[in-house]
């Protein structure tokens, strides 16, 4: 019946974990483990991987003025360095299931963590005669590609290997991703002040990535993977109006979310907030994202439809972003708190739409692929526009107006996507 909550939807975080390998034939079995202790070890590894998936964005933003001044970055390079990682999240998303069929999801995740570590090590290097820019570009691109693979494959492993603990593992995994952004925002500038070098502050984030790769190494190497192929058939989400409404909702959400990761700290610093305080404010905003992301899916799943919650959280996010630019500086903690709570809730309900608008796991996987490919690829335009507007006008005021518009559009498409109906 419309408005009822099926048994499979009672744990919203479990529902948002989409298995990218669900179309594989023969079906992929669980990770080979020898004991309950080994299963717990795998769970810790997966959560720790999640803890490395957003610090790339927030750490760079925390010291962006110092990097720009010391490395002599031209305006176009700043825009590219803040936009390219998000674009690559969409570009490499379709490649993840293909690599998993060939090598196994565990080994692809291990390879992605190795590439992420290498990218983080490469990013601050200075090449003789050419400066920092080539390494910054190459390292940032490597990080974006690696994170894209992890984004796609990690939820499937959580769902496949922890069917009896989906609520717990889904919550831990999602919280770890939010915590990753908070840690990058909060600790990078203090690391810069302690060492006096932005390069050292950025190099630090290669350490946790390398540790996790080493911890995950024995698990990945133990797996024996047979060759799979993708099953044909199923609902064509690319021809579904509902799928496009959900995907555009995701695009607009991504435009705001990744612009916050890339630009909120520079916005605050341009308004006169010192680097340490700006990092703390961004971290607090991201912690409120975690709160919103924990409670919003549960509320969305219990509502008859999701139109109201989608509209409210979209307007909270766009309004919070604009107030962080235009609102009185004395109340900046309030504005960024509103932004964080709205953004975390918006991201969570956008992902929850995957299961609430589909009837089976195969359609959900196809919709997830569409949302990640288009959502992150097109959503990166947000960070690009903020950078271009700042370069053209010299202030972030135009970006504030932009995201009032983006938040309003997100409310419109969220209203459409929130109607109680199914793809196919």
Image (cartoon, rainbow, N blue to C red):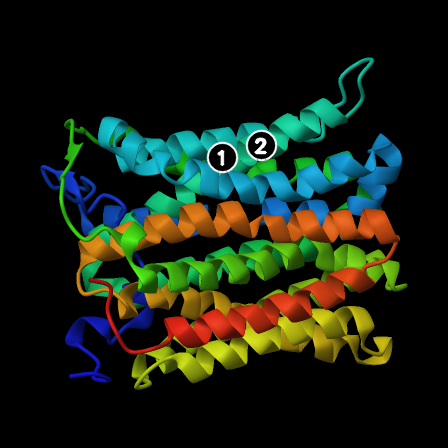
Circle 2 residue: 141
Separation of residues labelled 1 and 2 (CA atoms)? 6 Å
User: Does residue 314 sit above or below 132 in this rendering?
Assistant: below
| Residue 276 locus on image (x, y percent) | 80, 59
Q: Quadrant of residue 406?
A: bottom right
Per the image, label 1 sits on a secondary structure element best described as: helix
Q: Is residue 335 left or right of residue 307?
A: right
Circle 1 residue: 145
| Residue 255 locus on image (x, y percent) | 58, 57
| Residue 341 locus on image (x, y percent) | 57, 75
Which residue is rendered at x = 24% and y = 76% of the image?
10
Which residue is rendered at x = 18% and y = 28% of the image?
224
Q: Quadrant of the C terminus?
A: bottom left
The reply to whether callout 1 and callout 2 are in contact (CB within 8 Å) is yes
| Residue 184 locus on image (x, y percent) | 64, 51
Q: Residue furthest top?
A: 129
User: Which of the pair 195/132 is nearer the observer?
Assistant: 132
User: Does residue 282 sit above or below 335 in this rendering?
Assistant: above
């Amino acid at each position: 019946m419309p408005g009822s909550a099926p048994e499979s939807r009672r744990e919203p975080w479990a529902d948002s974990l989409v298995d990218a390998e669900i179309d594989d034939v023969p079906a992929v079995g669980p990770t080979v483990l020898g004991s309950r202790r080994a299963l717990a070890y795998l769970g810790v590894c997966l959560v720790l991987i999640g803890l490395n998936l957003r610090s790339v964005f927030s750490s760079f933003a925390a010291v962006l003025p110092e990097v720009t001044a010391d490395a002599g970055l031209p305006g176009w390079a700043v825009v590219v360095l803040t936009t390219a990682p998000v674009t690559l999240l969409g570009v490499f998303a379709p490649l993840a299931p293909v690599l998993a069929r060939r090598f196994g999801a565990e080994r692809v995740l291990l390879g992605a963590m190795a590439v992420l570590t290498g990218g983080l090590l490469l990013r601050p290097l200075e090449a003789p005669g050419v400066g920092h820019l080539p390494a910054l570009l190459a390292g940032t691109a490597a990080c974006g590609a690696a994170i894209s693979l992890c984004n796609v494959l990690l939820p499937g492993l959580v769902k496949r290997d922890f069917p009896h603990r989906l609520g717990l593992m889904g919550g831990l995994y999602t919280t770890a991703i939010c915590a990753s952004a908070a840690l990058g925002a909060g600790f990078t500038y203090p690391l810069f002040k302690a060492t006096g070098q932005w390069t050292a502050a950025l190099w630090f984030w290669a350490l946790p990535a390398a540790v996790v790769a080493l911890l995950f190494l024995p698990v990945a190497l133990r797996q024996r993977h047979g060759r799979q192929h993708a099953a044909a058939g199923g609902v064509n989400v690319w021809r579904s109006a509902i799928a496009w409404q959900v995907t555009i909702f995701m695009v607009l959400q991504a435009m705001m979310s990744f612009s916050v990761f890339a630009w909120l700290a520079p916005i605050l610093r341009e308004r006169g907030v010192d680097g340490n305080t700006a990092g703390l404010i961004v971290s607090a905003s991201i912690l409120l994202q975690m709160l919103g992301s924990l409670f919003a899916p549960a509320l969305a799943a219990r509502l008859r439809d999701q139109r109201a919650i989608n509209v409210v959280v979209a307007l909270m996010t766009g309004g919070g972003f604009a107030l962080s630019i235009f609102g009185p500086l004395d109340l900046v903690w309030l504005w960024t708190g509103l932004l964080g709570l709205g953004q975390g809730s918006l991201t969570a309900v956008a992902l929850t739409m995957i299961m609430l608008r589909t009837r089976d796991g195969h359609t959900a996987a196809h919709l997830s692929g569409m949302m990640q490919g288009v959502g992150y690829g097109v959503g990166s335009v947000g960070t690009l526009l903020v950078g271009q507007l700042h370069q053209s006008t010299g202030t972030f005021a135009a970006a504030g107006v932009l995201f009032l518009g983006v938040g309003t559009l997100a409310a419109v498409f969220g209203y459409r996507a929130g109607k109680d109906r199914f793809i196919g």
